[in-house]
Every structure is written in C-alpha cells, then in structure tokens.
Image: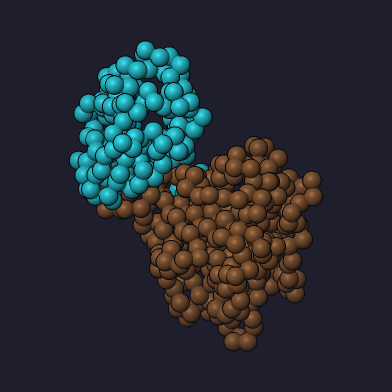
Chain colours: A brown, B cyan
Amino acid sequence: MEPVFDSKAAPKEAVLTPMAPEIFRVEKYRKETHDTYTLELRPASGTAEHQFRAGQFNMLYKFGVGEAAISISGNPSLANPLIHTIRAVGAVTKAISKLKAGDTIGVRGPFGSCWPVQEAIGNDVLIIAGGIGLAPLRPVIYQVLAERRKYGKVFLLYGTRTPDDLLYRGELEKWRARFDMEVLATVDRASSDWHGNVGVVTTLLKKLVLDPDNTVAMVCGPEIMMRFVAMDLIKKDFGLDRIYVSMERNMKCGIGLCGHCQYGPTFICKDGPVYAYDRVIGLLARREI
Amino acid sequence: METLEPILAAHPFFTGMSPELLKLLVGCASNVKYDAGDFISREGQDASEFFIIRQGKVALELFSPTHGPITVETLEDGEVMGWSWLLPPYRSHFDARAVVLTRAIRFDGKCLRGKLEEDHHLGYEMLKRFVKIIVERLSATRLQLLDIYGTRV
C-alpha cells in the first residue's frame, strides 16, 4: 500500500554542529502543574535563530548534570523565544526545573522528524494527547490555527490524570471557545467540583463523528495510551498511514550515532520521534524492543 | 399520541433491533428529566432501572469519608447508564448525579426483567448490547487503573 503521507520524508534541517551545545538564557519560567513547567529561552549570543518543525526535539544540557531530550512546545513560526515544557521526573529535568530567569542552559538541536502538518492540508485534523503529550502537539495546533482555512475540521482530545494536571489551561479555554475547533478534555479521576469528562482519553473518540478517509490523526502520550488510541482509530476504519505517533526512548546523541534510542531498524532520534503508525505497529507488539 | 418508539429506534444502543422487539420495550420506558445536582440513584439503593441519556451529563461517584465524592466516570448524550438492574441483588454500586440538566429515557428494570424472561430472543438481544458496553467500560477502567499518565508505566 502506498502511504498517504510519507513521514520518512519529513524534512529535517541539518544542524551544523550537532554535538556542540549553544548557550541559551532562561527568559521566563512558568509552572504549569505540580511537576511540569515551561521555559522560554533566548540565545545568549542574542543573534542566533532557532528554526524548528512541529514534533522535533532539542537536547537540553544542564551543565554539570547532563542532557535530556525535550520536545519543543512553542510556535514554529516564531524563531524566538524557544519554548520547552518539561516534566520533572529524572535527575536532569529536576535540575532544569530549578533554573531561574537569567540562568543559562545548553541547547543542541532541533532533531528528529516532524508531524505531517503540511501534508494534512485539505484534511480534517484529529489531535489526541495524553498528559505531557500535549507539549509536542502544541506546535501543530499553532500551525493549523495559523492557516485554519487550509484544513477541514480540527479536533483536540486531551486526557490527564486529574484536572490539576491539565497543561496550558488558558490556551485550552481559548481553543475551546473557537467555533472552528472542537476541544474535549477528560481526566482519569476528579472530585465533584469538576464538571468535565471523567474517563480515559479513548472514551472521547465515540463523541466525535469522524471521516477516516479524510482525517489525519496525530497522537502523543504514554505508549500504552497511543496503542489503545490507534486500536480504536483502526476500528473506526482509519488507515495505518493516517495515524501518526510520537515515540520516546532514551536519546543521547540526537543524530543516530550512539544507538541508545535504537527502535528495531530505526533510531528514534533520527528517524522519529514522529512515525506513521504503519512503520511502528509491528515493533510496538514486540516486548524486546 | 407520539410514543418513544422512534426515539429508541434512532438510538445507537438499539441499532439493528426489530420494530416488534422495540414495541415490547417501549411499554417499560418513560421520559425523565433531572436538574443539575439531582441524584438519579444512590449507592446501595434498589437498582430498578436503567437510562438512556438523551441530553446532559451524569457523574458516577463514590463517596470517600476523607476525600468526599470522587467522580470515576461521566456519561453523556447517547450513552447508557445502569446495569445493576440485570442481576440480583439489584443494588446500585455508585451514586449517579446529574452534572447539568439531563434528559433521559428511563426503563423500569422489573418490567424489563419480566419481558426478557418471557421472550428469550429479546433477552439475548438486550444482553448482547449490554455485554458490549460492559466490555468497553471494563477496558477503559483497566486503562484508568494503570495510571498511564503517572511515572510508573
């Protein structure tokens, strides 16, 4: 079967010095939830521009601690500031969470493949995010809304653990208020003062009327969530080449040399993180990978 | 007089059910309305009914002495609520509270059980539909139990 969109062909800008971090300065620090925060960074040199495509990631280097691969969550049409939303879960991300405005950080990138935002023009767009998975998809939302007339219907389904874990609450409200975008959020559990949906993100799919032959689904969240979402989309007659997922493994070099993020015959840092589902469906079922 | 039959026939839960069987069910159905905050059923009480939500939102809650009411699931337009009426001891396992103004079709469980016992074809058709919903909700509940957005998985 000929793929509708070829994620392998996702354009990647060559990074001239991929192993040398560029120094950035923290301009703003915003706490999103109890364990997640957003950093706005500007190059310390004041001149460099950081072009990226939706779905790509940077290696952020907390000097003296180490590097972590973090998706870019800002607007691809704005070269500055560089925006990352980070969940403090490991040694590096916890150390980065302690940075303050004015502090410096090393940045390598951008690396990896991108969401098929251009290729989806003329189609409906279904964005499904779980937890921190909304961060790598936010650039898609910015890009689609900037050229809203070029797309059909736009859906955003978002699931988190509790209402307090919802990212970008202000923006979610703005997107929900638009007439040209349907936004549904759900949480796994809530107290009775939450008037939204309670249930896993897959339960939101049945609330939508979808046209699988003319819709591109972009899914990001925990791997188990992505598997179940993809299963439900396939039940709804989505072709495997119309479902895109963003994979995560332990990335180190960012350029496919070190092998840390090898995923079957591919390297997630170079060939991913965004894959068409037909490229990974066989790998997802293998426990050894 | 307009009956509930066309409404039931158009509902996804009854897709594929013959008009003859639907006619049997209509006798047990009635239109109901709940204001926001109304309890539709309470944990431990008789579960003598099930509902097809036409419009609105219902929260299924459990009360914890330390955390107050905890919502474990919400149900909306087109969804089915309640299966405790099917099996003894016919007791509700959750509180069901209307989150917003909710309109539904209520089926009298005792009336239905009688008809399902009398007509096993109707009984099988209903059970098939309920099992599908139970499987979907069990699968969703398993995902919820995994706490997939946490750091464990």
Q: In the displayed structure, does residue B19 sit left or right of residue A226?
A: left
Q: In the displayed structure, does residue A232 sit left or right of residue A182?
A: right
B67 to B85, vertically: above or below: below
Residue A32, percent from left and from top: 41, 65
Q: Residue at x 40, y 56 (%)?
A: A165
Residue at the front extreme of this rendering: B1
Q: Quadrant of the C terminus of chain A?
A: top right
Residue A257, percent from left and from top: 76, 58
Q: Quadrant of residue B85?
A: top left
Residue A157, percent from left and from top: 49, 54
- Please state the total of marks drawn on the protein image: 0
A52 to A284, vertically: above or below: below
B79 to B35, vertically: above or below: above
Q: Residue at x 22, y 41 (%)?
A: B39
Q: Residue at x 65, y 71 (%)?
A: A52
| Relative depth, front residue between B26 and B140 | B26
Q: Quadrant of residue B31?
A: top left
Residue B76, percent from left and from top: 38, 45
Say whether residue A188 is visible. Answer: yes
